[in-house]
């Protein structure tokens, strides 16, 4: 069967790729929330114990399985329709995977924390790219990214969120504070300021992105509770971490589709 040029298969796989990219992000939150980040140590991408751990439900094993499916699917999409967006998708997945390896070294204290921030940004850029492929028509990835102003502060927030996670390391708390004293606390404060900037940006464009603003306000509450959960149990802060990631995904999706509901006071 010749798959090349099959528009229906291309569309189905593009939809699937968008869903897989979103699921992968949330699974990453589960990995962090339940302390599975170094299930395989720094072995990457696969280990002999991976099938057995996958059967037990280890989220890190499933994180790598879904990432593999994402990579294979990106190749199939590129074969069906060779083009710049499809090639960009494959490159984004490849670089995100390499930075996934770097995050293992971040967690083990052997690499700079900003690698985790870059990894998170690329994961969300991958989701955005496949949303554009599946739903964006002829709109180009880079032009969309540059002209959609709210995405600039969004991706700054994503970077600082990942940087915060990397800075605190594996199973370490940030610590309660009034005035920041440690590097982890300073990074958390900068992350909080980036969230505030993003909230102000969405508020300015509330007539277009009011649903995204509501999602962000909820996520801010979840984020503060996540901070408390990390300090209470740094090894297993729990469900709040993947929930935090889920709202980040919902914000990006709501911005992309321009979800708008007439909300009093927001225009």
Image (spheres, rainbow, N blue to C red):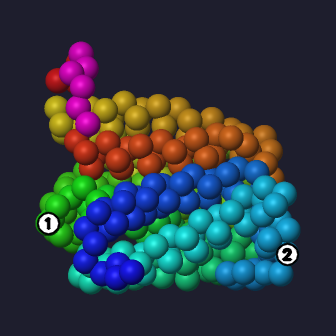
Checking the image for residue 138, the label placed there is 1
- In percent of width and height, residue 7 lies at 25, 68
Considering every residue shown, the one lying at the far top of the view is: 264
Dominant secondary structure (helix, strand or loop) of the stretch shown in magenta? loop
Q: Which residue is rendered at x = 64% and y = 40% of the image?
A: 240
Image position of 119 with respect to 224: above or below: below
Kindly identify which residue carries mark 2.
49
Is 263 or 1 nearer to us in this picture?
Answer: 1
**Quadrant of the rendered image containing residue 125:** bottom left
- In percent of width and height, residue 17 lies at 43, 63
Can you see residue 203? no
- Check disc 2: other Cα within 10 Å, few if <14, some if 14-19, many if 20+: few
Q: How many marks?
A: 2
Q: Which residue is rendered at x = 67% and y = 52% of the image?
A: 30
Q: Which residue is rendered at x = 36% and y = 30% of the image?
A: 214
Is 105 or 66 nearer to us in this picture?
Answer: 66
- Indicate whether residue 115 is drawn in magenta: no
- In percent of width and height, residue 53 lies at 83, 65
Image position of 237 with respect to 185: above or below: above
- 95 left or right, relative to 143: right
Image position of 80 with respect to 264: above or below: below
User: Circle 2 — which element?
Assistant: loop
The span picked out in magenta is: 259-264
The N terminus lies in which quarter of the figure? bottom left
Image position of 261 with respect to 234: above or below: above
User: Circle 1 — which element?
Assistant: loop
């Amino acid at each position: 069967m010749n798959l090349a040029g099959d528009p229906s298969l291309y569309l189905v796989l593009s939809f699937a790729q968008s869903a897989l990219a979103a699921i992968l992000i949330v699974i990453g939150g589960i990995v962090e929330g339940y302390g599975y980040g170094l299930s395989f140590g720094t072995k990457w991408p696969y280990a002999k114990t991976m099938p057995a751990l996958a059967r037990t439900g280890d989220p890190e094993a499933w994180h790598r399985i879904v990432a593999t499916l994402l990579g294979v699917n990106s190749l199939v999409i590129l074969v069906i329709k060779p083009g710049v967006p499809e090639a960009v998708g494959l490159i984004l997945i490849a670089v995100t995977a390499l930075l996934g390896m770097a995050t293992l070294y971040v967690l083990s204290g052997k690499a700079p924390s900003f690698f985790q921030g870059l990894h998170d940004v690329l994961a969300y850029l991958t989701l955005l790219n496949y949303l554009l492929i599946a739903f964006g028509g002829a709109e180009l990835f880079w032009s969309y990214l540059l002209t959609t102003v709210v995405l600039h502060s969004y991706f700054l927030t994503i970077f600082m969120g990942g940087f915060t996670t990397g800075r605190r390391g594996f199973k370490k708390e940030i610590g309660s504070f009034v005035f920041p004293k440690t590097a982890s606390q300073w990074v958390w404060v900068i992350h909080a300021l980036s969230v505030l900037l993003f909230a102000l940006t969405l508020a300015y464009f509330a007539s277009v992105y009011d649903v995204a603003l509501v999602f962000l306000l909820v996520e801010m509450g979840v984020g503060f509770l996540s901070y408390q959960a990390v300090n209470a149990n740094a090894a297993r802060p729990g469900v709040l971490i993947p929930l935090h990631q889920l709202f980040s995904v919902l914000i990006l999706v709501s911005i992309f589709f321009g979800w708008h509901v007439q909300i009093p006071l927001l225009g």
